[in-house]
Image (cartoon, rainbow, N blue to C red):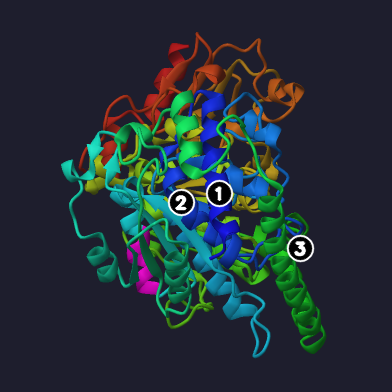
Amino acid sequence: MEAVDRKTVSTIRALCADTVEKANSGHPGLPLGSAAAAYILWGKVMKHSGTHRKWVNRDRFILSGGHGSSLLYSLLHLYNYGLTIEDLRQFRQLDSLTPGHPEYGHTVGVEATTGPLGAGMAMATGMAMAQAHLAAIFNRPGYPVFDSFTYVLGGDGCLMEGISSEAFSLAGTLKLEKLIVLYDSNNISIEGSTDIAFREDVQGRMKAFGFDTFTVEDGDDLDEILSAINQARVSQKPAFIEVKTRIGKGCPAKEGKASAHGEPLGEENVRELKRTLGLDEDRTFAIDEEVYLNTAKQQERSEVIYKIWKDMFDDYLVTYPEMKKLWKQYFEVDYNKVLENDVEFWKFENKPESTRNSSGTAMNRIKELFPNFMGGSADLAPSTKTYLNKVGDFSAENYRGRNLHYGVREQAMTGIGNGIMLYGGLKTFVSTFFVFSDYVKPMARLSALMNLPLIYVLTHDSIGVGEDGPTHEPVEQLTMLRAMPNFNVFRPCDAQETNAGWYLAMTSKTTPTALVLSRQNLPQIKGSSREALKGGYVIDECEGTPEIIIIASGSEVTLAVEAKKRIRGKAIRVVSMPSMDIFKQQSREYRESILPPGIEKRIAIEAGSRMSWGEFVGLKGKYITMDSFGASAPADELFKRYGFTVDNVVKMINKL
């Protein structure tokens, strides 16, 4: 390496230290320790373009240790992604482009929102899966349309988190050779040496997962780092590079100490750092012209690589003209236009059916309409009815397959789903039993934060699960997911509403959707309609002005309709509310037409917690909901035990 390379690394370290110091908040340890590895990646290895920032075949870089964000922001500044020195000065300040942890969609060049440790490892795995699938679909001899790598950098914390083990176990099984993990191995955690809680043979574990492993003994040796990455790039397995670093590298008072992790170095220590690095200690946020010229020259190399790819791609479309249409189906598709008037999609049989089965029918129509639609479950496809017929299984032997087999790995499944969506070109879903949304939720929260319209197919939605008992019977999960910002929960009552839920999920551009589906058969309700697209609507109207409004979702809508039939002399309106989130997005005029403020006699019926219903029922309303865990018994007995019967609904109405 040349002297300018060493100087660039030193400049990155100083820039990171200044950024954290100016904010008086942040994490300097990882950026100082991993600056050399990050520089080699961005300057010597990765194909990426500050000019063509959304190039589909760019290499992806995920900072799984998102607390080290000052490192990523410094790189984005140096490599022409639009971040200015002033942006670095505004690190961690309100409305800045440099928040405490990287946020996808907020800062250009950030490929994923990271912060929860290990999450980036799963998302990187998802990106590598997406690349493998798209390469299998689009690549032709001499035309490597998709040959990008995904690089992910994280530390001890990322590897301690279970999600990384889940993801890497699957990555090894799938032989994702375009996935390269860089492990910032500094033997330090927040509480001290990693020896207090983390002594395993990490490389041995990664080998067992099916990775090739490499070691960089000196995390500051640029040539050794480059050599290891180049070896990893030619591996036919996913690769794991342990880069032995020193946390807080270059700061004598902090290097190798836990105190370097999560607090500013202090003004005098920053000055000492710069002296150690051979930089002017009196200058802050200083970048010499030769450093800018160095990174600009490296970007010129990337622009040449981009142009070569673009010329190849243009020739590819001439050589294979049929691929133009397919490309549009992946990257320019209008889901709304295709689904809105597709008769087959909206069709259903007028017979009792579980909404999980109705969903399976809808999904198999969707997969015919959209070749980029793929997904899978946490080893539950036969139960969640999510298998896509006749499109094959995604595996190390067949990356063209569209059925993903995640194994029993719910949290990694969701993080991987996020990664697939982040890569681009694909529409995907994940699936498990609704009660296990507890395992799903951390990565679902990232879906919502990143505005990713990932689809969650969550079945076995209530005590209707029956004999499996309270460990498998969701109670509080609806409330949990409804409480999440930018996350649509849709619990349909029949096939028509299930189709509406799938339409909303497929056409959403910025919001993930959870389809919460029944295990047990439900009747097709006469008043069910596409009005469900509004989240709530009148499914069974009374004559004249209603005296009482019953609001229900899912399987309990049938109870409401049947109870209404039993009562004479009262004007009762039944409202189906499959999605509170969507309903609240409607105009005030519409909402009040469905739930007139003057009508205070209301009942909410749902086989889940009552906590999210208060704003719709009001202080004078009644509830038929679950206020305890369920039990192990046949479903019919449980519904009787907990009051989900027509008789009990009638009784409650008569109390109003």
- Type of residue at label 2? Gly
Would you call the spot at circle 1 few (<14 residues within 10 Å), some (14-19), or many (20 or more)? Answer: many
Residue in front for this viewpoint, 315 or 543: 315
Q: Above or below — where is 434 with respect to 543?
A: below
Query: Is 614 above or below relative to 587?
Result: above
Residue 97, given in percent of the width and then of the height, sits at: 66, 35
Tell me where the magenta segment starts and ends, as one range. Answer: 167-174
| Residue at x-position 47% and y-position 41% | 68
- SS label for mark 3: loop
Q: Is residue 47 magenta?
A: no
Secondary structure state at the residue bearing disc 1: loop
Q: Nearer the viewer, mark 3 or mark 2?
A: 2
Residue 112 vs residue 569, the one in the foreground: 112
* Residue 523 on image: x %, y %: 49, 49
Identify the amino acid type marked 1.
Ala
**Pointer 3 or 1: first along the chain:** 1
**Spatial CA span between label 1 and label 2:** 7 Å
User: Label 3, label 2: how many angstroms apart (C-alpha)?
Assistant: 27 Å
Residue 420 in view, yes or no: no
Q: Residue at x 62, y 13 (%)?
A: 599
Distance from Cα at disc 3 to Cα at disc 1: 22 Å
Q: Which residue position holds label 3?
A: 332
**Residue at point 51% right, 45% down?**
514
What is the number of the mark on residue 112? 1
Mark 2 and mark 1 in contact (Cβ < 8 Å)?
A: yes
User: Looking at the picture, does residue 532 appear above or below residue 5?
Assistant: above
Side (left or right) of 105 relative to 189: right
Q: Which residue is mark 2?
A: 120
* N-terminal label among 1 and 2: 1
Mark whose residue sits in front, 3 or 1? 1
